[in-house]
Amino acid sequence: MSRKEKVKKERKNRRYRWTKRFFLFFFLAVVALSLAYAGYVGAKMYQAWDKIQSENESRPAQDPDQVVGKVAPKKSEPFSVLLLGIDDKQASHMKGLSDVIMVAIVNPQTKKVSLLSIPRDTYTELIGLGYKDKINHAYAKGGIEMAIATVENFLDIKIDHWAAINLDGFRDLVNVLGGLKIYAEKDMYHHYKKENIIIDIKEGPTVLNGDEALYYVRFRKDVEGDFGRNRRQQQVIKALLDQTLTMRNVTKVGELIDVVGDNFRTDISATQMLGLVR
């Protein structure tokens, strides 16, 4: 082998060794960053779940396998979840009227969820008070236990679990996601003079910001009233779940956890929640 060929071969070997070292370093750096990020997310999730499992910050912590004094259904059996959107205008730690009331029936075997919306102005007996009033007053007057008992009595079913979100937190969640992609059912315009916020939604495919999404789910100034609003609430929940779980939001996990931790409460355990996500 000539000297020239030897030099050429040596250069090639050096390039190969350098390339090999570069990719090894790059791989180790990615692994280290991934582990660090996973640890960061894990710590934030632990802190957030501590808040999530304490309803109103005063209710005693529940056994994850118990729900409102009842034995939870087996993992393979259908179960019900009371979903509440709380109008917490005073930032008083999840206290206020439950302006969104839904019951979800989850069937683990068929992997399907059915949603039933209850109009907030439904007039019914508030269990524990002995008189009738609008159903959205139950949570404000007696917390989650009165809300559950009232819905159970009204629908004549058992509520196995519950989850509640502060509606202002819903707005923040949409903003963290970068907006909510949805097909708006109709034109909607409103001017909140106090905050100087203008809502101008046009019918058709659109991306709603937090304020627009909140107005969209609360709008009832048409002939449909609560019936149209309930349908739009279900539409938004589906879109929100779809977009929260997409890969494009991986970098926003920390912000999402902060918003959820501050504005979401449930008696569903972390293990059960992961099962629901799957």
Image (tube, rainbow, N blue to C red):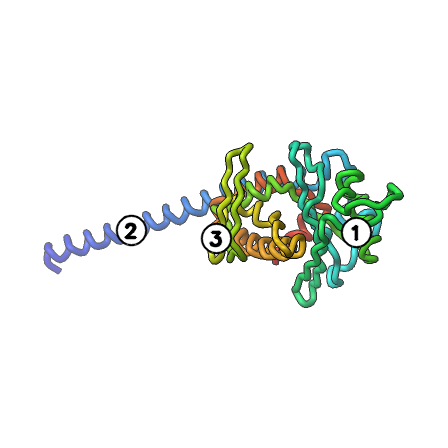
Q: State left or right for residue 46 relative to residue 195.
A: right
Q: CA distance from mark 2 to mark 3?
A: 54 Å
Looking at marks 1 and 2 on the same chain, the residue that comes earlier in the sequence is marked by 2
**Residue drawn where x is 62% and y is 42% of the image:** 167
| Residue 66 appears in the figure | no
Q: Secondary structure at mark 2?
A: helix
Q: Position of residue 229 (x, y in %)?
A: 63, 53
Q: Amino acid at mark 2?
A: Thr
Labelled pair 1, 3 in contact (Cβ < 8 Å): no
Q: Secondary structure at mark 3?
A: loop
Q: Nearer the viewer, residue 266 or 13?
A: 266
Gap in angstroms between the C-alphas marked 1 and 3: 35 Å
Residue at the spot of label 3 = 202
Residue type at numbered disc 1: Val
Question: On the picture, is 243 further left or further right than 277?
Answer: left
Q: Residues within 10 Å of mark 2 (few under 14, many from 20)?
A: few
The mark found on residue 19 in the picture is 2
Foreground residue among 96 and 224:
224
For mark 3, does the 10 Å Cα neighbourhood hold few (<14), some (14 to 19), or many (20 or more) residues?
A: some
Which of the 4 image quarters holds residue 110? bottom right
How far across and down, in percent of the image, does residue 20 sit? 32, 52
Q: Nearer the viewer, mark 1 or mark 2?
A: 1
Quadrant (top left/top right/bottom left/bottom right) for the N terminus: bottom left
The residue indicated by pointer 1 is 151
- Report x, y in % for residue 4: 10, 55
Residues under labels 1 and 2: Cα distance?
65 Å
Residue 268 locus on image (x, y percent): 71, 49
Please tell me whether mark 1 sits on a helix, a strand or a loop. Answer: helix
* Mark 1 or mark 3: whose residue is earlier in sequence: 1
Q: Is residue 212 visible?
A: yes
Q: Give the amino acid type for the residue marked by disc 3 in the picture.
A: Lys
